Image (cartoon, rainbow, N blue to C red):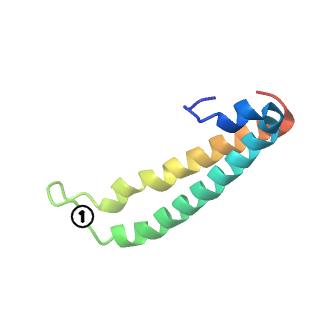
């Protein structure tokens, strides 16, 4: 895997690994969609703010959150596809 993980269930029940990984990715996908959705809504509030020191509109700074969520969603979908396909 690409991250540190707790493998207690996988170690105790090796047969569950083929189903556990896709379930974990689906849960992560739901979480990332929620984070992305909230971040997009928060951009409307950030449009009204600017950085005190530099005067940069804060929505330009906060745009990284939904963009990062989109990249992670794409990465998770690719990983889910590979898990369901049976490849690595």
Kindly state the secondary structure of the residue where label 1 is placed: loop
Q: Residue shown at 85%/36% (left/top)?
A: 85
Residue identified by numbered label 1: 50
Horizontal arrangement in the rendering, residue 74 relative to residue 13 (left or right): left
Q: Residue at x 17, y 54 (%)?
A: 54
Which image quarter holds the N terminus? top right
Q: Is residue 63 above or below residue 9?
A: below
Task: Tell me residue 37's x, y (percent).
Answer: 55, 65
Q: Residue at x 19, y 59 (%)?
A: 55
Residue 75: x and y in percent read: 64, 40
Which residue is depicted at the point 59% across and 29% down? 2
Horizontally, residue 74 falls left or right of residue 43, namely right
Could you say where residue 30 lies in the image, as x and y percent from the top left? 64, 58
Foreground: 60 or 31? 31
Quarter of image, res 6: top right
Front-lying residue, 42 or 86? 86
Q: Quadrant of the C terminus?
A: top right
């Amino acid at each position: 895997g690409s991250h540190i993980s707790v493998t207690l269930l996988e170690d105790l029940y090796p047969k569950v690994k083929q189903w556990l990984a896709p379930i974990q990715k689906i849960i992560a996908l739901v979480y990332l969609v929620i984070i992305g959705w909230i971040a997009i809504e928060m951009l409307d509030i950030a449009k009204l703010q600017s950085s005190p020191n530099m005067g940069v509109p804060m929505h330009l700074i906060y745009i990284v959150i939904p963009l990062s969520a989109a990249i992670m969603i794409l990465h998770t979908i690719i990983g889910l596809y590979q898990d369901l396909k049976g490849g690595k």
